[in-house]
Image: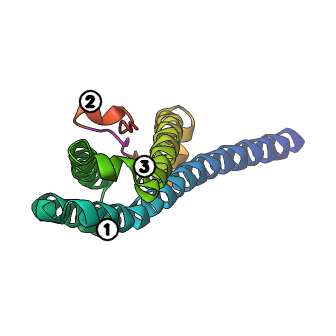
Amino acid sequence: MLYLIIALVVLALIGMSLYNGLIKSKVKVDNAWSDIAVFLKKRYDLIPNLVSTVKGYAAHESQTLERVIAARNQAINSNGASVSDVAASQQALSSGIRSIFALSENYPDLKANTNFIELQNSLKEIETDLSSARRYYNATVRDYNTTIQSVPQVFIANAMKLQEREFFELEDQAETKNIKVEF
């Protein structure tokens, strides 16, 4: 009888340990996604300033600037959507930002503008941070997905109704590179 009680206690401790490991892994994924959301917000906040600065020098390029603002608004609205929807909206936004920097090539005064240079530097820093956050998120998703599919955790994960998480993948491999900022 004592052995049975000891075995039950050991099984309960193992079960709690597995459960806690699953919760820890899930929280890491949620935290990593939160980090991405913070960097995306910084990016969104920077874009109107960038557009305003460019508008002062390239007012007749309004169609390009309007597309960037539309892409920004779509990206903001996609934040509650799936990871793949957020990734798609980020690709459109990155494309728009690249078009603004391409415009700057035609306007030497804009390229020399201190505010524009500061915005470029800020955007470069945000893009670097976002890239790092994306890598960390994907690593935590990989670990989480592996954990919930492994024995014996799979039994507890199924009981908890834990689902695999999506990776933050970019369809266009050019998007894996930081936006090029030249002076």
Q: Mark 1 belongs to which amino acid?
A: Ser
The quadrant in which residue 161 appears is: bottom left
Task: Give whichever of discs 3 and 1 has the lower sequence position.
Answer: 1
Please name whichever residue, 47 or 153, is drawn nearer the observer in this view of the structure.
47
Tell me the mark number nearer the camera, choosing from 2 and 1: 1
Q: How many numbered discs sit on the rendered protein? A: 3
Residue 77: x %, y % from top left: 28, 69
User: What residue does disc 3 label?
Assistant: 120
Task: Give whichever of discs 2 and 1 has the lower sequence position.
Answer: 1
Does 180 sit above or below residue 17?
A: above
Please name whichever residue, 103 or 179, is drawn nearer the observer in this view of the structure.
103
Magenta residues, as a range?
166-170
Please name whichever residue, 72 or 108, is drawn nearer the observer in this view of the structure.
108
Tag 2 secondary structure: helix
Tell me the mark number nearer the camera, choosing from 3 and 2: 3
Residue 50: x %, y % from top left: 35, 61
